[in-house]
Amino acid sequence: MQIVIENTSNGSLQSLEQDSSSPIHELPVEILIRILSDVLADPMSAPFDCAQLWILGHICSRWRSIVCSEMPLAWSNINVDFRPFTRTARRPHHAAEILRVCIERTKDCPLKIAFRCASDIVAATGDGWLQCLDALVAVSERWKGVDLSIPITVLGRLVSAKGHLNSLEVLNLSLEPPNAHSLPHLLDVFEDAPKLSSVTTSSHLSSNTFKLPWKQIVNYRTQRMEVENCIDVLHLAPNLRVFHAKVEKPRSSSLGDRDTTGTVYTLSTHRTRSTFNSLQSLSLNVLMRPGYEHELLQRLLQLPPDPNQPHEDSQILFPSLTDIRLATSPTALANYAALPLSQSCFGSSLTKVTIRSVFDAPSDYKGTREFLLALPMVRQLAFGVCFHHTHDVVNILYEILSLPSSSRTADIDKPAEIVLPKLEVLILDIDYGESTPTWVIDPMKEMIQSRRESEFMTRFGCVPLQKFHLYLATWTTPRQSFEKSLEELTNEDFEIKIMRGLM
C-alpha cells in the first residue's frame, strides 16, 4: 500500500490511497508526528485557519488519534478573528464549540492567543464572540503571548484572569475606540504577571487605570502617547530596553504653556534629570508635533531645579542606547542638532541611526549636517525618503555625506569637522520617479568613493564604508542603470545592494 499526501491548489491535503498493511502504519508515533509536522504550514493558526490540520485527522483512525491527542503544539497557536469577512465571522454560532475542541487538543501546552473583534461586527455575531473570549480567559494560566483587539467595553471580562497569568510574557492590547487614553474602570489584571516583559498598546493608557508590572517591562511600544507619558514610562520602567512611541500633538492641559518664541515651560511637577541606563533602542514618531519634535529630549535634558547647582556634562541620558529611529519633519533636525547630543544625550554605544522624513526641497535639509556632526560614533545610517527629481536637490545629501577630497584635507583641522567618520553601513531610501536622469548617479558614486578613499581615512582615523544599500521608493524606477553604474565600485570588502520599496 501507498499513502501519498500532497498539497493541492487550494492548500488542502489529500489521501490518495491507503492500505492498513502499509509499513507507514508501523512507524513509531514520534516519527509520524515529525512527518506530519513537516507537512503542515508554519506558522499555522488554529482552529479556523488550519485546514491542513483538520484534514490530516481524516486520513485514517490512527492519524486522527495522533492529530487530536498527540500533537498539542500544532493546536496551541490560537487565532479567533471576528472581524468582517473572516472565517470565524462567517460561522459565529459554531465558533465557541470549535474553539472548545481546539483548546482541549492543546492539553497543557503554553498558548499563543490572538482574539480580534471589531465593534461593528458585534450585533451580527450575537454572543458567539463573547463565548469565545470567555473560553480563552478560562485558560489564561497557559497564556504565553496574548494579542487582544477588542472594544473597551468588554475589558471587564478579563478580570477573572487576574492571578492566573504566571506564564504570560507578551501582551498586545488594541482597544476601540483607538484614541482612548484612560479606562472607565481600574484594570489591574496584568499587574500580577511575573514573566510579562513585552507590552504593545494601540494607545498609551493612564497608569492610574491600567496597571502593569513596570519594573520588569523591557519592551514597550505604543501608537499614541504624549511627551509627558513618555517621561512617565521611562521613569516607571527602570529596566526598559526597547521603547517605540508615536507621540501625539500636545494637549494644552498636559504639556505646559508655550510662549511665542517656542520656549517650553515645564510643569510644576518638575523631575530632576535622570539617567536611563538600560535603554538600548529608542524609536520616536513625532510627525504630529511640527516645531516641537525634539521636546522629549529637551525635557529630559532639563537642569536641576536649583539653577546654582552645577550641571555635569558627563551625565548621559541614554548611555547604553545603540539604536535610535526618528520619524520627523525634515527641518526638525536643526532643533535636534541644537541639543548636546553627544555630550549629554547619547554615549559611545550609539551605532545605528534611522531618519524617516520627506526631503523634497533644499530647505528640508536644514540642520542635517549639524545633526550628523553631533553623532561621530554612529556606524550605520539609514536615511530617507529623499526625492531626487530636480538637479538642485540631488547634490545636497551627497555633499553632506561626502568626505573631503584629498585636495581639501589641508582645510580640515580636526576630526570633529568630519561627518560620521566611523560610518560603515549607509542605507538610503530615494524616490527618483519613473526615470533615472544621468545626473543623479554621478554624485552618488562620488560620495561613495570619498568614503572609500584610504589616504584621507588614515589621516583622520576614519573607517571605510563597508556596505551601501539603496532602496528605490518608486517601483517603476529602472534598477538596472544603478546596478550597472555602481558595479565598478563593488569588491570583496564592499557590498552594494539595490532594492525596491521602502526600507
Image (cartoon, helix red, strand yellow):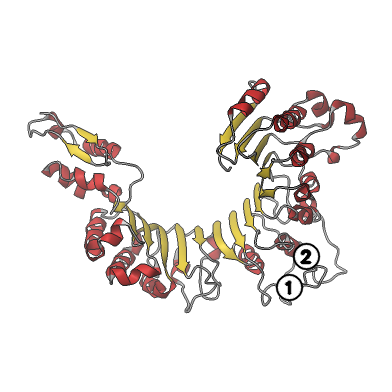
Q: Quadrant of residue 217?
A: bottom right
Q: Which mark is residue 302?
A: 2
Q: Residues within 10 Å of mark 2 (few under 14, many from 20)?
A: some
Residue 71 visible in the picture? no
Mark toward the start of the polypeptide (1 vs 2): 1
Measuring from the top left, give residue 243's x and y in whole percent. Answer: 59, 56
Query: Nearest the camera: 181 or 486?
Result: 486
Query: Image height check: is 259 above or below 320?
Result: below
Query: Nearest the camera: 212 or 178?
Result: 178
At label 2, the amino acid type is Gln
Q: Residue at x 51, y 63 (%)?
A: 202
- Label 1–label 2 contact, CB within 8 A: yes
Q: Quadrant of residue 429?
A: top right
Measuring from the top left, give residue 256's x and y in whole percent. Answer: 72, 74
User: In what element is the residue under mark 2?
Assistant: loop
Measuring from the top left, give residue 102's x and y in whole percent. Answer: 25, 56
Measuring from the top left, give residue 70's x and y in whole percent. Answer: 22, 46
Residue hosting label 1 = 270
CA–CA distance in space, label 1 to label 2? 9 Å
Image quadrant occupied by the N terminus: top left
Q: Which mark is residue 262?
A: none
At label 1, the amino acid type is His
